[in-house]
Image (cartoon, coloured by chain):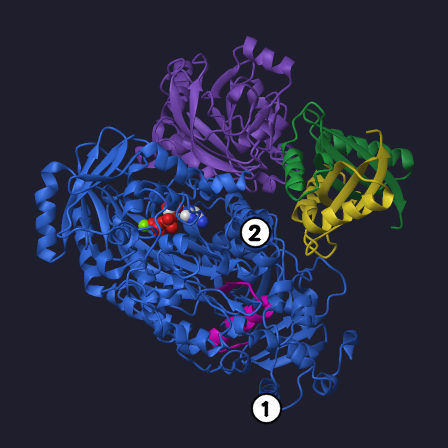
Chain colours: A blue, B yellow, C purple, D green
């Protein structure tokens, strides 16, 4: 056999397909589709196309439940990224993707190539990328390896985004030891496009030429596939660490956009996981066509590469392009200007086969439908985990170290709550000069050139919540994302998601996946934010321990007029502070799921149920907030989330304006210490703090009353920079804002800078 | 005894070296077309104490494996010499 | 006033510079590809920020051999205004049009934040609209912005009043010698600065303090040429 | 004839090496307290053709002076060896 590879018979007899991760049934199915034994290369192609990563075999049935349509949706799931109309003949293109496993092995390159991959998904649609976000999960920073993973991932994300010149404008970071061995790195990219420039990944038109453009192909990431074992289904990803080249990608981005702009491109798709194999199969599948590709024509940077290696290589910064026949020269010219290669390697056929040739020899010949449409679905067993029925709903009894103030300071310096400046100051958040709200507020805001509009972006997810209540936790992630957009003055438009879970072959894990996806679906319906794309990352387990079920929601909102942009920092003394939503929700909800409980009772913090969440309450609070912003009533808005009420208030007070806060709570009965903790640090959802000028207080309260939303006056913004909380006449927390601020700002840096 | 280790770290041969590629291209543009290949790596000079040569060797290898390089993508070589302390 | 904004492979603040010139002055600005060999048609040349050639080897090291750089040197010699911002500053030092070098930030990290600059010298074509000693807010975004020159060179710079911007005392974000953020050549027609004035041209961007740098350039040009 | 030049670039002694300081600190934190000093530089492997050793030496020096190093802040040493082409 060519290249010293095993023969089809040997593949069968020695069960080589097992080392590729194919099961017995899957191998039989391949034989049935082909009507013969697959050769070595074909077996490799099937194995990657039918892998969890490419085929979504465990998650496909779950993903079908997402609402994916809406008035503004121009492109739902199925293409490289989804597209949503924002008026003026413009549309926003976005998607989120995970790069968890490579990051665990080589954090800098793993995170960097994750960013590179998601950017390609956006410009492959013809869109100009305008913003990046990232959602990160690591183990706690008191561990040196966690610090290593964290610092190098952040450096890699910055290294790629900064170099390519797309601002990284937002994201989130959570630290919890459940992620020690499986850090999560999810990257989101957003692009802008004119309606008539939308490109798709279709290989149509018999005889149209197929081009490989961008970087040369090497053996990156193929050994993994060869040695992957069925026991460790993601071993293949793990050994597949590639080095990214953001400079190359910047050139590729400019060249591809210039090429798409000529109107001579039939279809274009980036080469991500499973490189040439998946890009060609998917492009042919979308068009119902076939392809012939000659691997000897692919530009390579290593010698003696086999068809198998060529098809499975995951070298970065490459795209597959189908051009109008006879127009190839346009591509050659544009790519040459940018110092890149563009090479025709084959053409479109009408026979429905993906045919890989090596000069005169046929190396593989597979029906496209067999690779894509007939990919197996694994209907996983689902079982409600026992712990869910044993959660407590009473108030935990916490030992308060000394004062409430000290509790607040301790919470503010928790690495999950603390300022993420250490992270986002390493990202260029301003390049392109359209960033109107930089990282640090509830959502990032980026202007739409040539209009009065702006777009707001956010990523949100709380694995602990989803662990404690998969359905409601999923819904709450969507609600929090929407709330953050609303606080920034934006109308939520649509969602992309990254579903990070443990091993789906465990029924309890599959239950978490299924239930949380349902919760997300329900919430997306309520908030009218369809899911237009996303990504699934499974098998995030090691040593038998699975990560928290961690769906991350990326959401995009629209601000019709930049005058409505709102931030969370206080603006002026004398203004009033109000809470939209239930001030004393904590008395019923307790501290379940809260960061406070994790801090004070790490052994039992998972014993308590999540706060209640009611869609109507959430919707009401958001509607009032957004309308108040649009009516010009507010000067600041900030939602109450991680850390609870006092953390949110303190965050608002930490501004350059050197202001203070004086608030007074007047409960209708005396509160015990545990009651107070629940009110101050409980994480009941559906609440937003707002700053209002005196003359607008009346208007705000009437607006809230009209919507039946509780709206309580808490106190005022003060000139002296002190943070004071009264319960009736008693001062229960008092601290210089400066003291709170240094605890909050310095926490991560003090771990990282040693 | 005091030792100096000179450590040369490069990306593994099969791993893409974008920096090396860019430098090669730049040299070609500067008319150094006789240059075939450039690879760019890291160079470290580490001065440290160790009781004997074997201990010194062991420490260099341990530091490289654990911290100074990532064996997933990098390889290294080193030279070791005793120096006046 | 015709401004050329040089575009190297990997430049990424090129459009930002074009937009800034257009929105703050009555002049025009256009991108000029790095293979261009003649810049005589332009009044002002901007070498913009970004990662020319990926910043591989050293920031600015490869770009400085681009064909366009000879033309930049020629126009600089003729007294035209040449301004290097961030990566542009790195390119100009590598090319020897400005003294010194830019090292990796002392923190070893890329830093992006609003910086506070003291305007040290208002007697340059770039700063005539500022007040001496004024503190202005201009963003930085760099990993290699740590300006270095040996003692003799720094003394030269001081003596000739070539230091244009310094970071505010105690607020040096990168460890540069003498808190230097921007310098001019002896002739004062070539400026290099790490902070990004083109990112501070509108209140929505968090500061409009960069506007006067562009209006200074425009006024200088107008004084020399009348209203053409 | 084909040559390989191994080029070691370091910051001049008078120029601070924050990277070296950071590596030293990290090694100390990992209990390698016997490490006195680390300096971090660049390492380049350049493969190129030259007619003879002298020409090869001249080319390496020219490339270093003009492009591969910045004499304002860096110095370099190198080793040269003939390799099979
Ligand atoms: N990894 C990150 N990258 C960029 N910005 C981040 C990152 N993590 C947090 N931020 C920014 O810090 C601010 C606070 O984040 P977070 O506490 O998660 O906000 P919220 O609780 O409102 O969701 C936000 O503006 C967010 O975008
Ligand atoms: Mg928020």
Indicate left or right for D71 with C66 as reference: right
Relative to A599, A243 lies left or right: right
* Mark 1 and mark 2: Cα distance apart in space: 45 Å
The span shown in magenta is A267-290
Mark 1 and mark 2 lie on one chain; the one further toward the N terminus is: 1
**Residue linked to disc 2:** A149
In this view, the residue in front, C119 or A134, is: A134
Q: Position of residue A272 (x, y in %)?
A: 55, 63
Magenta region includes residue C115:
no
Between circles 1 and 2, the one closer to the viewer is 2
Q: Nearer the viewer, residue A286 or C55?
A: C55
Looking at the rendered image, the quarter that the C terminus of chain A falls into is top right
> Which residue is situated farthest in the right direction here?
D52
Question: Is A269 a magenta residue?
Answer: yes
A12 vs A512, nearest the viewer: A512
The number of numbered discs placed on residues in the rendered structure image is: 2
Decide which of C115, A735 is in the foreground and name it: A735
- The residue labelled by disc 1 is A32
Residue A34 % position (x, y): 61, 87
Quarter location, residue A366: bottom right
1 and 2 marks on the same chain: yes
Residue D64 appears in which quarter of the rendering? top right
x, y percent for residue A154: 52, 47
Looking at the image, residue A582 sits to the left or right of residue C207; the answer is: left
């Amino acid at each position: 056999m060519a290249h010293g590879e095993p023969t089809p018979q040997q593949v069968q007899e020695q069960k080589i397909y097992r080392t590729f991760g194919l099961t017995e049934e899957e191998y039989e199915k391949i034989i049935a589709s082909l009507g013969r034994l697959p050769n070595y290369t074909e077996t490799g192609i099937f194995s990657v196309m039918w892998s969890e990563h490419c085929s979504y075999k465990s998650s496909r049935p779950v993903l079908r439940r997402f609402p994916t349509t809406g008035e503004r949706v121009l492109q739902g799931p199925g293409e490289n990224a989804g597209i949503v109309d924002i008026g003026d003949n413009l549309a926003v293109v976005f998607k989120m993707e995970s790069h968890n496993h490579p990051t665990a092995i080589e954090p800098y390159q793993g995170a960097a190539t994750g960013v590179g991959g998601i950017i390609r998904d956006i410009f492959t649609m013809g869109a100009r990328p305008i913003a990046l976000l990232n959602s990160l999960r690591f183990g706690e920073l008191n561990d040196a390896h966690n610090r290593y993973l964290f610092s190098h991932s952040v450096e890699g994300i910055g290294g790629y985004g900064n170099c390519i010149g797309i601002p990284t404008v937002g994201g989130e970071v959570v630290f919890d030891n459940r992620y020690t061995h499986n850090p999560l790195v999810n990257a989101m990219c957003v692009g802008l496009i004119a309606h008539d420039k939308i490109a798709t990944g279709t290989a149509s038109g018999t005889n149209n030429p197929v081009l490989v453009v961008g970087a040369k192909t090497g053996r990156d990431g193929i050994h993994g596939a060869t040695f992957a074992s069925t026991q460790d289904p993601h071993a293949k990803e793990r050994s597949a660490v590639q080095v990214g080249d953001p400079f190359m990608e910047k050139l590729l981005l400019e060249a591809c956009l210039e090429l798409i702009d000529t109107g001579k491109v039939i279809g274009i798709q980036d080469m991500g996981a499973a490189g040439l194999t998946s890009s060609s199969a998917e492009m042919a599948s979308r068009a119902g066509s076939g392809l012939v590709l000659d691997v000897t024509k692919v530009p390579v940077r290593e010698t003696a590469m086999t068809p198998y290696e060529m098809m499975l290589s995951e070298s970065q910064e490459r795209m597959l392009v189908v051009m109008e026949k006879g127009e190839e020269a346009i591509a050659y010219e544009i790519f040459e200007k940018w110092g890149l290669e563009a090479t025709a390697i084959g053409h479109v056929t009408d026979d429905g086969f993906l045919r890989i040739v090596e000069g005169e020899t046929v190396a593989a010949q597979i029906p496209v439908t067999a690779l894509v449409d007939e990919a197996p679905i694994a209907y996983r067993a689902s079982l409600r985990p026992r712990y869910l029925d044993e959660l407590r709903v009473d108030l935990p009894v916490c030992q308060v170290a000394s004062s409430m103030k000290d509790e607040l300071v301790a919470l503010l310096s928790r690495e999950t709550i603390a300022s993420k400046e250490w992270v986002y100051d390493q990202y260029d958040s301003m390049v392109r000069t359209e960033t109107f709200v930089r990282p640090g507020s509830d959502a990032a805001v980026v202007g739409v050139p040539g209009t009065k509009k702006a777009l707001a972006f956010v990523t949100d997810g709380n694995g602990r919540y989803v662990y404690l209540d998969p359905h409601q936790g999923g819904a709450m992630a969507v609600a929090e994302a929407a709330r953050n957009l609303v606080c920034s003055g934006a109308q939520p438009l649509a969602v992309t998601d990254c579903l990070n879970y443990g091993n789906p072959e465990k029924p309890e894990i599959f239950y978490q996946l299924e239930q949380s996806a349902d919760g997300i679906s329900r919430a997306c319906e309520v908030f009218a934010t369809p899911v237009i794309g996303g990504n699934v990352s499974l098998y995030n387990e090691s040593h038998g321990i699975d990560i928290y079920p961690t769906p991350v929601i990326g959401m995009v909102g629209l601000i019709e007029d930049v005058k409505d942009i709102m931030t969370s920092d206080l603006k002026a003394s004398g203004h009033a502070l109000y809470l939209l939503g239930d001030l004393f929700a904590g008395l019923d909800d307790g501290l379940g799921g809260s960061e406070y409980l994790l801090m004070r009772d790490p052994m039992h913090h998972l014993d308590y149920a999540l706060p209640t969440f009611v869609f109507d309450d959430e919707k009401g609070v958001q509607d009032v907030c957004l309308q108040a912003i649009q009516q010009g009533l507010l000067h600041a808005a900030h939602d109450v989330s991680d850390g609870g009420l006092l953390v949110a208030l303190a965050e608002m007070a930490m501004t350059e304006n050197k202001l203070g806060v004086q608030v007074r709570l007047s409960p209708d009965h005396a509160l015990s210490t545990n009651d107070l903790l629940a009110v101050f640090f409980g994480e009941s959802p559906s609440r937003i703090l707002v700053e209002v000028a005196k003359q607008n207080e009346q208007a705000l309260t009437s607006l809230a009353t009209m919507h039946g939303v509780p709206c309580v006056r808490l106190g005022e913004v003060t000139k002296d920079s002190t943070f004071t909380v009264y319960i009736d006449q008693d001062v229960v927390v008092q601290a210089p804002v400066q003291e709170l601020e240094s605890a909050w700002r310095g926490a991560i840096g003090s771990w990282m800078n040693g | 005894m005091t030792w100096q280790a000179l450590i040369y770290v490069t990306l593994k041969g099969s791993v893409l070296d974008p920096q090396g590629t860019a430098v090669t291209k730049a040299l070609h543009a500067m008319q150094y077309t006789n240059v075939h290949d450039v690879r760019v790596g890291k160079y470290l000079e580490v001065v440290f104490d160790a009781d004997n040569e074997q201990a010194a060797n062991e420490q260099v290898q341990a530091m490289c494996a654990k911290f100074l390089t990532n064996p997933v993508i990098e390889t290294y070589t080193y030279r070791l010499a005793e120096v006046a302390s | 006033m015709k401004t050329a904004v040089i575009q190297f492979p990997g430049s990424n603040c090129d459009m930002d510079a074009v937009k800034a010139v257009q929105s703050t002055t009555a002049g025009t600005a256009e991108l000029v590809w790095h293979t261009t060999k003649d810049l005589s048609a332009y009044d002002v040349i901007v070498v913009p920020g970004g990662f020319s050639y990926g910043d591989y080897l050293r920031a600015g090291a490869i770009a400085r051999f681009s064909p366009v750089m000879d033309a930049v040197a020629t126009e600089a010699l003729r007294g035209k205004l040449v301004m290097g911002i961030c990566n542009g500053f790195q390119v100009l030092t590598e090319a020897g049009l400005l003294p010194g070098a830019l090292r990796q930030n002392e923190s070893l990290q890329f830093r992006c934040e609003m910086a506070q600059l003291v305007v040290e010298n208002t007697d340059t074509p770039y700063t005539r609209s500022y007040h001496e000693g004024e503190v202005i807010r201009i963003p930085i975004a760099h990993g290699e912005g740590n300006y270095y020159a040996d003692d003799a060179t720094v003394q030269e710079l001081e003596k000739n009043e070539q230091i244009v911007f310094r970071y505010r005392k105690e607020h040096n974000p990168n460890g540069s010698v003498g808190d230097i953020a921007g310098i001019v050549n002896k002739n004062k027609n070539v400026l290099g600065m790490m902070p990004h004035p083109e990112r501070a041209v509108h209140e929505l961007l968090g500061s409009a303090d960069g506007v006067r740098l562009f209006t200074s350039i425009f006024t200088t040009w107008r004084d020399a040429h009348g209203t053409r």
